[in-house]
Image (cartoon, helix red, strand yellow):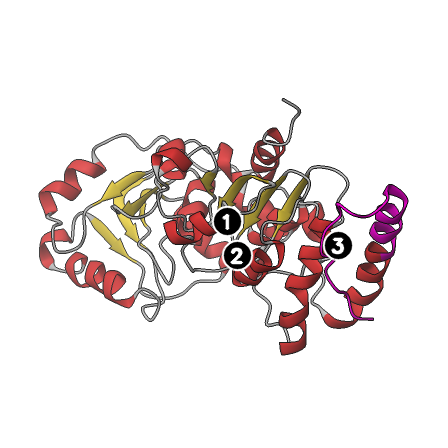
Amino acid sequence: MRLTLAPSFGARPAGCQVALRVSCRRAIASEADTWMHQLSTRFRSLTLIASATYLARSDFWRCASRPWTKDSRAAAQRLPHTLAQELLTAQQPTVAFVETRYVEEFTKLIGTRATVPFVLVTAGSDAPMTRTWQTRLLRMPGLRACYATNLHTPLDAHKDVFHPLPVGFYSMRLNAQNEALLQGQFASDRDCRLLVPWMRMKNGQKMRRGYWNVLESEEYKDLVVLMKDRLAFPQYVEKLARHRFVLSPPGKGFDCTRTWEALAVGSMPLVAESKTFDPRIYDAARIRRIAGAAELSAETLAEILRGPAAVDQRQLKVDYWAARWRQHLLPG
């Protein structure tokens, strides 16, 4: 069955609208099983932030494809239509999760059509949400707020609409066992040296390689611990938890999972300074910044390592974000 977008609800009698909504929802449910990577029900019970748990707490969890999966060409063509139809037929204010790669087509399909008030949540990609894209999204009349990973700092006039969202944890690694690991009891007496974890150098190679080359030099030998080998996840978590500070430079996207993994075990991630990306999630977590490799010195790093390392972990919980999304949809 092919789903087509209704041109407008303005000319339809109320009974026709209800019938259309019901038939479309049934069609979506019956067809979804056959062409998309469905969200595993385990994500509905997990508590930590990830693109998949964001989807699980949205109103689109039954009809959207699981983030970070490689959809077929047919699925990639159909999914934006399915998501747009879901919003156009919604009867109640809606939290709409749209994976970043589908936002462009979804936005075109909604256009300036009337919809219920909705909050757009977009994640599942390293691509930034630029100011240009923010302006395009504002054309959708029902949009009340947008939460996006790798958000460029909005114009002051748009900061009440656009909000940064952490990339959180890697969805395919997140399960009940690994949640328990990340939320375990960790010692408060920690190594004061900066942990430089093993990192994929092909992702964000220039910045990561730059830090590595600087920090492996002789003048930093008493200030850092270089983790040269990749560890299994339990051992990796244990290693993070031994240190007060963990270096977390960008990968393909500016924000990265390591930042939130370190935060989860009570360590202070050090993230790169940026004049482009919205810092509000880092400020709320009390995450500290570190200068670029070219500007860094042993003296400035030593000063950072002598400083406070207390973090705020509230943003690690998906319930925190779900409550914020719903707040925008309250009457009045």
Q: Are marks 1 and 2 in contact (CB under 8 Å)?
A: no
Foreground of the two, 190 or 37: 37
Of the 4 image quadrants, the one containing the N terminus is: bottom right
Residue at image mark 3: 62
Secondary-structure class at tag 2: loop
Residue lying at 18% horizontally and 60% vertically, measured from the top left = 216
The image's mark for residue 137 is: 1
Residue lying at 82% horizontally and 57% vertically, measured from the top left = 24
Residue at image mark 2: 170
Q: Nearer the N terminus, badge 3 or badge 1?
A: 3
| Number of the front mark, 3 or 2 | 3
User: How many callouts does the rendering have?
Assistant: 3
Q: Amino acid at mark 3?
A: Arg
User: In this view, which residue lies farthest toward the top?
Assistant: 332
Badge 2: residue crowd in 10 Å (few <14, some 14–19, many ≥20): some
Of the 4 image quadrants, the one containing the C terminus is: top right
Q: Are marks 3 and 2 in contact (CB under 8 Å)?
A: no
Residue 306 lies left or right of residue 311; in this view the side is left
| Number of the front mark, 3 or 1 | 1
Badge 3: residue crowd in 10 Å (few <14, some 14–19, many ≥20): some
Q: Where are the magenta residues, as a range?
A: 1-23
| Number of the front mark, 1 or 2 | 1
Q: Is residue 271 above or below residue 74?
A: above
Q: From mark 3 to mark 1, how far is it between C-alphas?
A: 23 Å
Q: Nearer the N terminus, badge 1 or badge 2?
A: 1
Q: Nearer the N terminus, badge 3 or badge 2?
A: 3
Q: Percent x, y for residue 37?
A: 69, 67
Q: From mark 1 to mark 2, how far is it between C-alphas?
A: 27 Å
